Image (tube, grey):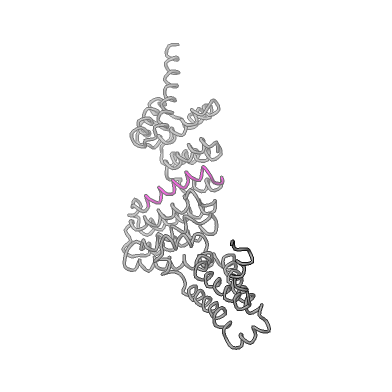
Amino acid sequence: MEPTVNTILNYVPHLTNSLVSVYIEVLTVLFIVIIGPEIIQAVMSVELRSLMNRFPSIFFQVTPRSVYSMIIWFFFVITIMTFIIPHSKATQLARNEYPFWKNILAPSLVILTFLGIVLFRRMFLGRSLKKIILDRLTIRCIKSLETQTIPNDNFLKPIIFLGENNQGGNEKYDIITELNKIASKQLDKENYDGTYLENVIVALEKVLLNTSFPGDDQNFSDAGQLLVELQDDICESNRQLINSNDVKLIKTVLERLAFKAVENHARWVVLEFIDKVSDNRRALFRIGAEALKCERNSIGIAALNKLETTAEDQYCLPMDPEKCKSGNGAYLLGLIAHYWDSGEAGRTFARRLLLRNKTNHIIECLDSSFNYHTINTGFFITADKIHKMKLTFENAKARKNNN
C-alpha cells in the first residue's frame, strides 16, 4: 500500500512554541558561526578587506584593539540574549504569557540588530577605521627609522597597497600626507647622504599612476609640490647633494607624472608641472611632444616657450652646431621638428620659431641634433622627424645653388 500524504504528515512533528524556539536558536547559531564572520568583514571597506587578505599579520598588528573588543562584546551580548535569557526562570514564566515574543521575535530582533550595526559601521565609520590603520602604519614606519635609514617594508607596503586601491581625491591625499611624514623624518636624520628616499618616492609614483585607481588633478598637484619641496630641502641642507640619487629620482618621477598629466589631467595641472620641471630640458621636450600628439596645443606651446626660456638662460641661443651636440639645442630643435612634421600649419609655426631663435647653420644644427637623439636619448621618432626637416632644408639649398 502506497503511503498517502496524510500518512507522511503523521511523521512530521507538530510545530509547538518550544519546537519553533529550538529551530530559531539553531538558525541563530548557524548565523553567528557561519555568516557572522563574513558580515564582520563587511564592516570594513573593500580596501581594508583586501589589505587583511594580503597582509594578515600586519593588519592585525595595526588594527585598533577597540575593534576586537567591540566584536567580542557583541558576540557576548548575542550569546546572553540567545542562550541564557531564553532559559532563565523569568523567561520560562513569560513564555506562557508571551510565547511569540520570547520564542520567535526576540531572536529575530537580535539578528536584525546585528545587521543594523554592521550597516551603520560600513556607511558612517568605514573611512575612520581606515584612517586609524593608516596612521598606525605610518607610526610603525617612522619608528623603524630609529634603527635604519629606510622605512620597514612590512609597514610601507600596506601603505602603498592602500594608496593604489584608494579612489582619487581625499583618500589618496591621506596617503600622500603620510608618505610626506615618512620622507621628512628620513631627511631629518643626521647621516642623510642623498640615498634614503627611493622607497618613498617610488611609492608616491605607484599610488598616483595605478591604472585602476589613478590620482585626480589635485592629487597630482599635491604630489608634484611634495617632490619639489623634498628636492629643495635636500639641496638646501647640503649643496653637495644636488646630483645625489634622490634628487635624480625626484626629477625622473616629476617627469613621469608631468608626462602622464598631459594625457588625462586638467590644463592647470600640466602648467604647474611645466613650472616644476623648468630646469629639465628632457621633461619639457616630452611634455611638448605629447601635448602636440594629444592635440593640446596650448600646453605644447607653453612647454616650447619654457624650453626656449631655459635655452636662453643657459646661453644656448642663438643655436649653433656645437650647442646642439651637447643637447643644449637638441631638445628645442627636436620639439620644433615635431611641429614641422605635424602639417602645413605646424610647419609655418616651426619656421617662425627658427627665425625667432636666429638659428645659424640650420643644416649643421639639425645634423647634430639628429645624432644626439639617435645616440644619447633613443628618441628615434624625433630623430626621424629632424632628419626629414634637414632634408627639406638641404633640398631648398640645392635648388638655390642651382639657380
Is 48 above or below relative to 98? above
Q: Can residue 131 be seen in the rendering of this structure? A: no
**Which quarter of the image is occupied by the N terminus?**
bottom right
Residue 154 percent location from the top left of the image: 37, 63
Residue 293 vs residue 245, the one in the foreground: 293
Is residue 251 rendered magenta in the image?
yes
Check if residue 135 falls in the magenta segment. Answer: no
The answer to whether residue 378 is left or right of residue 19 is left
Residue in view at x 45 percent, y 69 percent:
63
Residue found at the very far front of the displayed protein: 1
Residue drawn at x 45%, y 18% is: 396
Quadrant assignment for the C terminus: top left
From the viewer's side, name the closer residue of 18 and 133.
Answer: 18
The residue at 42%/36% (across/down) is 331
Horizontal and vertical percent position of residue 114: 58, 71
- Residue 53 is situated, as x and y percent measured from the top left of the image, at 43, 61
Secondary structure that dominates the magenta span: helix
Quarter of the image for residue 231 reads bottom left
Q: Estimate the x, y position of residue 309 in percent, counting from the top left.
A: 47, 40
Q: Is residue 120 above or below residue 285?
A: below
The magenta stretch is 247-266
392 relative to 111 in the view: left or right: left
